[in-house]
Amino acid sequence: MGITIKCYPYGMFEENTYLITDESTGLKAIVDPGYYSDQVANDIGDASSLKYLLLTHGHRDHLGAVSEYQSIYKDAVYAAPEADLGIMYERNSPEPTMLLKGNESIELGDTKLKVIATPGHTAGGLCFCTDREIFTGDTLFKMSVGRTDLPTGDWNTLLSSIKNNLFTLNEDLIVYPGHGPTTSIGFEKKANPFV
């Protein structure tokens, strides 16, 4: 068993909101809740099955629909990077119910999501990793990396996060980025021109 993944690209930046479902239990999580619609609601189904709203970093395009989710899925835990609270509150983001720093493990039914700290795009950047997949937010894209010219971004920190925290992982991991198509850790190690 594992997870099923649905992706909803949205907005002018085509931010990827992901719905992940633990195949054994049917429990669900949203990674980067920037988008909500009737289609997402239909795909979630029973409101009690949505357990988590997981935020990779505190930019508006990735958290813009948190309030909508919270108004409908009242028991879902909103987990966000502690180090990004400052930039989140500047945009009047709702208060997270769980703060993450990295090295935590989130259990979604039979699926364990390891939280990996990947600062650089923002100070609090995080990735969520299973045995087969990794959700990288705006840290790592196919043939690209996140920008570092926004508040709390830092180029050297981003490169260190990618080289030391991501490129040391299993090369077969499928990368689900915050924008654009999927890739793999192995492909990016060989081909990404920015790292």
Image (cartoon, helix red, strand yellow):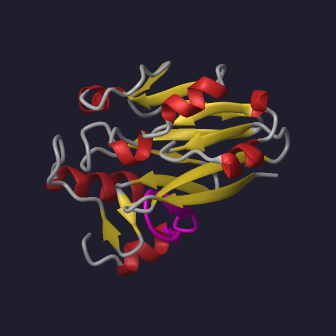
| Magenta stretch, main secondary structure class | loop
Quadrant assignment for the C terminus: bottom left
The location of residue 172, given as percent across then percent down, is 58, 68
Percent across and percent down for residue 128 are 52, 45
Quadrant assignment, res 74: top right
Task: Kindly give the residue lying farthest to the front in the view shown.
Answer: 38
Residue occupying the point 54% across, 40% down: 114
**Coordinates of residue 16 in the picture (x, y in percent):** 50, 57
Where 37 falls versus 49 (above or below)? below
Asked if the magenta segment contains residue 175, the reply would be yes
**Residue in the picture at 39% in, 72% down:** 189
Q: Is residue 59 left or right of residue 186?
A: left
Left or right: residue 179 versus residue 193 is right
Does residue 164 appear to the left or right of 45 in the view shown? left
Residue at 52% across, 61% down: 9
Residue lying at the far right in this picture: please name it: 24
Q: Is residue 172 above or below residue 1?
A: below
Tell whether 186 sits left or right of 160: right
State yes or no: residue 77 in magenta.
no
Give me the residue at 16% from left, 42% from top: 151
The magenta-colored residue range is: 167-184
